[in-house]
Image: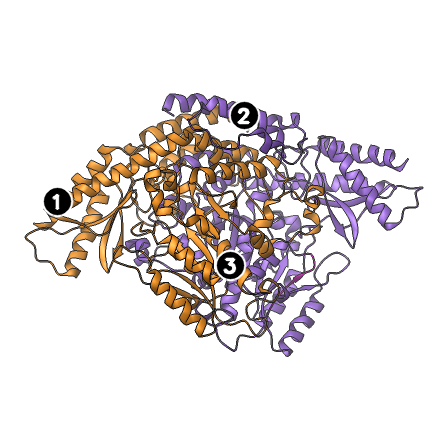
Chain colours: A purple, B orange
Amino acid sequence: MDSAEFRRHGYALVDWIAEYLAGSERYPVLPRVSPGDVRAALPATAPEHGEPFEAIVADFERIIVPALTHWNHPGFFAYFAISASAPGVLAEFLAAALNQQAMLWRTSPAATELEEVSLNWLRALLGLPDAFEGVIYDTASISSLHALAAAREAAVPGVREYGLAGRTGVGKVRVYCSEHAHSSIDKAVMLLGLGHRALRRIAADERFRMRTALLRDAVAEDRAAGMIPLAVVATLGTTSTTSVDPIAATADLCRREGVWLHVDAAYAGVAAMLPAYRHHFDGWEAADSIVVNPHKWLFTPFDLSAFYCRRMDVVRQAFALVPEYLETAEGARGVRNLMDTGIQLGRRFRSLKLWMVLRHFGADGLRAVLEEHIRLAQLFAGWIDADPDFERLAPTPFSVVCFRARPQGTALTPAELDTFNERLLDAVNASGDVFLSHTRIDGAFALRLAVGHLRTTDAHVARAWELLRSHTVRLAR
Amino acid sequence: MDSAEFRRHGYALVDWIAEYLAGSERYPVLPRVSPGDVRAALPATAPEHGEPFEAIVADFERIIVPALTHWNHPGFFAYFAISASAPGVLAEFLAAALNQQAMLWRTSPAATELEEVSLNWLRALLGLPDAFEGVIYDTASISSLHALAAAREAAVPGVREYGLAGRTGVGKVRVYCSEHAHSSIDKAVMLLGLGHRALRRIAADERFRMRTALLRDAVAEDRAAGMIPLAVVATLGTTSTTSVDPIAATADLCRREGVWLHVDAAYAGVAAMLPAYRHHFDGWEAADSIVVNPHKWLFTPFDLSAFYCRRMDVVRQAFALVPEYLETAEGARGVRNLMDTGIQLGRRFRSLKLWMVLRHFGADGLRAVLEEHIRLAQLFAGWIDADPDFERLAPTPFSVVCFRARPQGTALTPAELDTFNERLLDAVNASGDVFLSHTRIDGAFALRLAVGHLRTTDAHVARAWELLRSHTVRLAR
């Protein structure tokens, strides 16, 4: 593809994307396809001869677009709603063309240093002290994996060299988190060879916060049984209800016990920018490591997970390994090489989009959007609370509302109520105007409305509410 | 940023990238910056107020571009040379805007099924049987990590639940690879909790291929000592010399021993598309898992690593874990959810670029480029062989040449010869026209010239040769 062709196709895609970003509402949020539709529409093998780019784009529009779930739609309220903002999308375009591989400073001084600068900017916005060194990974799964790997390195002498079964004397280890912690913690514990049973889930209180007293008892009990408490994972914004574990008390306990504290703030971390919400974060500056995902609620296209660590030397101790062909003069002089802080040798130029997003919005712009999203969620929560046919199932500290319908005048068993709400969710999502997801809270099927898209307005939240109410009336008949 | 602004900035970036892809030669391949330059040129904190996109792009050009190492430059001959092809770059632009998160079929039917289709296409091009199921990860580090995690799952009963130190009876385990295997294997073994000593590196022959007889002896010796041979990693295209381990013999041994065989073909795997090079791959179809990186030598922007596995059920057994909030009706009916085959919950829409690249080039187009790159490397190797002042240090099976200067009429000690070649490499790279990297071969400092960029021509290889010869003459004086 020569320059002229690239310009032609590039301009066409700019037009397509401009329309998409402004007009994704013309698509149903959830696509109307069945499993196998995309596969069946495509040939079984690659073409023998190259095809015109127009033909590829035509198939993209004909086959791929109708099978997209539109994460970049203002009616996307599922999971954690996210946005690929325009500056972030343009930054990714540039990053793809530059094709940096920032394993070493030498292989991309720009990406290496911009990662440091942009993470320092974000750290200051979050109000975290300079003692936290940052590194960018792809996902929170990988950030938390590195946190627990570092905790293992710190707690089990010689584990890098000898492993967990390599010599006698390595007792059973334990990792603690709330019953509401994310499944990535389970997966990390399994991958690290600790065994799933090493993860002890602590019961939460009525507001879905880890009970510190039970955590303390569990650590004491395990110590008495000769086990090694490796790490505690506290969550700032759990996946189901966005509840906030008591960070300060957990940090005190971890300091006293000499246990690694990892804070999973993948979703809610950015709310630390808002003075009115800072109290949720009291004590997180005492953590050993923290993960915050700009690809969740900071308008940065997927993927970009920010990992902050007070003890990055331990991460390096766990992972640094430099083969001869990657030795450089700068490395010998102590320059930072990003490959030393991770399991992945290859690293994309992810910081470019974070830097452009932070500059495009500015600190006040980011705060304004976050506040607006929280306002919209609280507005919706207020409608739920005021309607006798609905009930909220959890507090709403940030931008996610958990609720269910409980239509008056019906006498539904708990199982029937679950079924009713499952049907309600399906009906609302079938509209194509919105997409909500679900969870279970204290055993009950719960609907979740998560606000996080840049273009979500009162009208979108009102549309969700209108759909919920009208389908509840219909289904209750 | 509204639609009109997005178009304006988007068109400008299309122009910039069009010029960059066609004219990256106006930049020095290796930037002329010192550690700290980028950091010093940027403010210490994010702006309080949002800035115009023009100002951000201006700083990008002023501060970031001069600090790029130009991986997308036809004189980039270091490590493994790669290309972000134009269709791949355009695909990434689209993928960023769509912002798919393909953890579940429901969260992106398009990305889920296009991943299957594009990997099936690639599998057929590679001549691998349908028994290999594919999944896309970010890097070969993560692909090989999953391979060894699956091997651990298969060899150590209950490891997911009980871990490696969780109960008695788990003996020491062993993973085998050649002395020339990639450092990602070391890192995976360490992360998995096996301990670095569990990795037994087998000596290679004079052509840098793992000695199968020594591997057989090592496995027998370890079995006799009560250890569990977990996996063998054979490399098709090692990092230093691109040597090829004897795959068929290794596969025979692994089958007899019941040991997982993982084939690291991250770089050279794509050469399986070329009939003249198929003999290198004899027996790889018997592997349990294979990694091939389209982001290396298949013109796909970084990152995209293709992982093929005959026993994906074991990967699922090691990793599948579905919390309530990610349960879907389709999942209950058995549709494939990509989150079940990996440690990362979040997954970008990486298959879009692979699909577009495969269609843009077509099978014959890809074969033609690969053949051309091998031709250029063989041409260069011929020049080295014909010049009495140079010597080749390894066979050149694909597109990478390992060599050094050994100027006639000088009587250099081995250490002096190393220093001479280090200086030669620095001088050649300082030209800005080319970037070569180094390794050590049998203890000697070796230069590496890797061909892999779409726009690399005879002229670029000739320029590297001219620089090498002229600086050798100068330094030998």
Image quarter in which the N terminus of chain A is found: top left
Given this view, does label 3 or label 2 mark the residue nearer the observer?
3
**The residue tagged with tag 3: helix, strand or loop?**
helix
Q: Position of residue B457 (x, y in %)?
A: 26, 32
**Label 3: chain letter:** B
Image position of B427 (left or right of B295): left
Q: Residue tagged by mark 2? A: A59
* Residue drawn where x is 41% and y is 32% of the image: B363
- Amino acid type of the residue that numbered disc 3 sits on in the rendered structure: Ala
Image quarter in which the C terminus of chain A is found: top right
Marks 3 and 1, how far apart in space? 47 Å
User: Between B442 and B470, which is closer to the camera in this rendering?
Assistant: B442
Q: Quadrant of residue B21?
A: top left
Marks 3 and 2, how far apart in space? 39 Å
Q: Residues within 10 Å of mark 2 (few under 14, many from 20)?
A: some
For the magenta stretch, what is the residue range? A174-180
Q: Residue tagged by mark 1? A: B387
For the stretch drawn in magenta, what is the main secondary structure? strand
Q: Residue tagged by mark 3? A: B151
User: Between B437 and A41, which is closer to the camera in this rendering?
Assistant: A41
Does the CB distance between marks 3 and 1 fall below 8 Å? no
Does the CB distance between marks 1 and 2 fall below 8 Å? no
Marks 1 and 2, how far apart in space? 52 Å
Is the same chain shared between marks 3 and 2? no
Q: Position of residue B116 (x, y in %)?
A: 55, 39
Q: Is residue A16 above or below residue B64?
A: above
What label does residue A165 carry, if any?
A: none
* Residue drawn where x is 85% and y is 49% of the image: A415
